[in-house]
Amino acid sequence: MRLDTVLCGIPLRNPVLAASGTFGYGIEFAHIIDLNQLGGIITKGLSREPIAGNPAPRLWHTDGGMINSVGLQNVGVAAFIHDKLPKLRPFSVPVIANVFGYAIEDYLEVLRALEDAEGIAAYELNVSCPNTKEGGIFFSSDPGLLGSLVSRARGVAKRPLIVKLSPNVARIEPFAQAAESSGADAVSLVNTFVSLAIDPETRRPRIGAGYGGLSGPAIKPIALRMVAEAVAAVRIPVIGIGGIASGEDAAEYLIAGAKAVQVGTATFVDPRAPHQIAKQLAKILGRMRADSIEEFRGIVQSAPPCTAK
């Protein structure tokens, strides 16, 4: 079955990408999986300067998922360009650089540095970071602030710009629309859910930083609903994220209208998960007698709007 597709003008071998934060910088897994068979690689988040990350423990296994608080540990954009990116260039897989910051200027400086580097297909803005210059407001929880960030980033980035949205909001539509109207080429969602696990013996959080981000199969039904809502709210492509561990999971997101999907937590179980999921997806298309992904996407039956009672 034909799994190839095009995302923001970027040809993808298949619609299954390795998500940011769970696949390193990509090159670390080249001895385990053929990187050229992936739809794409999204790097660990890149910042202006190196970040050591949060205190241990950083991960906690939960029923149906995982809580993490790594603290955006990364080598910094300069070291990525000098040490990591050259090792990725021999591969044909599209590389998308995830970018974050604590103020708009941080994002812009990282983007400026990456603009001069070869071998990057697009950028993904992680907007779930506190804006320290605005009293701790999160870019992801204020549509106006989000729009300002995306608009400024659009003025710097010549490559496609994807905005990764947080699920920790009342409604996702205003944020997807703010990203679209400010110049985003696509949105990806969802990031992790703020969560907490407590050790009854010590009466302390099981995560060193206290709160963490919940990911994995437990969040899939909610993430899938939010992706469907975003698809209905914007015209730009939507990339689905959240609990994808099988071809059937990926198929659900595509049927809901996602242009592509990202696989994150499943790679902790098996780094080959994105490739395995793509192969399973091909078999599902075969059973449904679909000749391509495009015949399969967005065919979910209409559901009534979600209303509070």
Image (cartoon, rainbow, N blue to C red):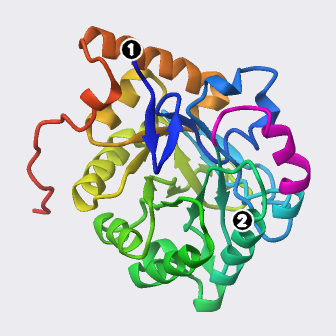
* Coordinates of residue 152 in the picture (x, y in percent): 56, 81
- Residue 253 falls in image quadrant: top left
Residue range corresponding to the magenta coloring:
80-94
Is 22 placed above or below 268 here? Answer: below
Element class at badge 2: helix
Residue under the point 44% across and 53% down: 189
- Viewer-nearest residue: 115 or 65: 115
Q: Amino acid at mark 1?
A: Met
* Coordinates of residue 191 in the picture (x, y in percent): 50, 54
Residue under the point 53% across and 28% down: 13
Give the distance between the C-alpha atoms of the residues marked 1 and 2, in whole angstroms.
36 Å
- Residue 288 falls in image quadrant: top left
Q: Which residue is mark 2?
A: 115
* Coordinates of residue 244 in the picture (x, y in percent): 46, 33
Q: Does the magenta portion include 83?
A: yes
- Image side of residue 14 versus residue 289, left or right: right
Residue under the point 33% across and 23% down: 292
* Coordinates of residue 192 in the picture (x, y in percent): 52, 53
Can the viewer see residue 281 in this picture? yes
Q: Earlier in the sequence, mark 1 or mark 2?
A: 1
- Image side of residue 214 versus residue 240, left or right: right
Q: Which residue is mark 1?
A: 1
Residue under the point 22% across and 55% down: 232
Label 1: few (<14), some (14–19) or many (≥20) C-alpha neighbours in 10 Å: some
Q: Which quadrant would the C terminus be assigned to in this image?
A: bottom left
Q: Which quadrant would the N terminus be assigned to in this image?
A: top left
